[in-house]
Amino acid sequence: IYKELSHQYRRALAKLRCSNHRLAIERLRGVVDRPGRVCKYCLNLKNCSFIEDEYHFIIKCPLYETIRQTYISQYCIERSPVNFVYILSPKPETVIKRLAMYTYYAFKLHREFMGFS
């Protein structure tokens, strides 16, 4: 299944699964307590302090809504932890492919929003 994905999609999915990414939950580990690792987009847009973790990144954050609609909306119609677990499960194959594509484009948008190169 992973051989069918392009290198860029496989890499993005591996970064997500291994917590090797720039979401605040990891980027600020050891610097800021967990409650302080908030999503800057949600803080600026809605004045809400949601922790920027993998669940927020995949299921909740409005920054990625267009990408979410394109790739994984059919798997997370009900935005719940149960659907989050389903999306990250190793099967079915189509879910993994679509999650990999979502992750690649959402990480790209995250880098642009945060000003990372």
Image (cartoon, rainbow, N blue to C red):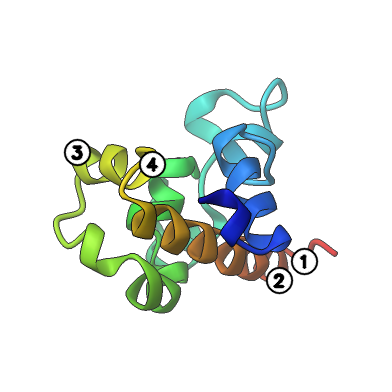
Q: Which residue is mark 3?
A: 82
Q: Are marks 2 and 1 in contact (CB under 8 Å)?
A: yes
Q: Find residue 89 and report its image quarter.
A: top left
How many neighbours does mark 2 have within 10 angstroms: few (below 14), some (14-19), or many (20 or more)? few
Marks 2 and 4 sit apart, C-alpha to C-alpha, by 25 Å
Could you say which is closer to the camera, residue 34 or residue 16?
16
Pinpoint residue 29: horizontal percent, then vertical percent: 67, 26
The amino acid at mark 2 is Glu
Label 1 – label 3 distance at C-alpha: 32 Å
Q: Position of residue 66 (x, y in %)?
A: 40, 79
Question: Residue 88's quadrant in the figure?
Answer: top left
Of the two numbered discs 2 and 4 in the rendering, the one whose residue sits closer to the viewer? 4
Q: Which residue is mark 1?
A: 115
Q: Nearer the viewer, mark 1 or mark 3?
A: 3
Q: Which residue is denoted by mark 2 in the rendering?
A: 112
Front disc: 4 or 3? 4
Q: Amino acid at mark 4?
A: Leu
Give the foreground label among 1 and 4. 4
**Drawn side of residue 117 relative to residue 8, left or right:** right
Does label 1 or label 3 sit earlier along the sequence? 3
User: Viewer-proximal residue, 32 or 69?
Assistant: 69
Q: Is residue 39 above or below residue 14?
A: below
Type of residue at label 1? Gly
Residue at position x 63%, y 60% in the image: 9
Which of the numbered marks, if any, corresponds to residue 35? none
Q: Which secondary structure lies at badge 3?
A: helix
The mark nearer the N terminus, 4 or 3, is 3
Residue occupied by mark 4: 88
Dot 2 falls on a residue whose secondary structure is helix
Q: CA distance from mark 4 to mark 3?
A: 10 Å
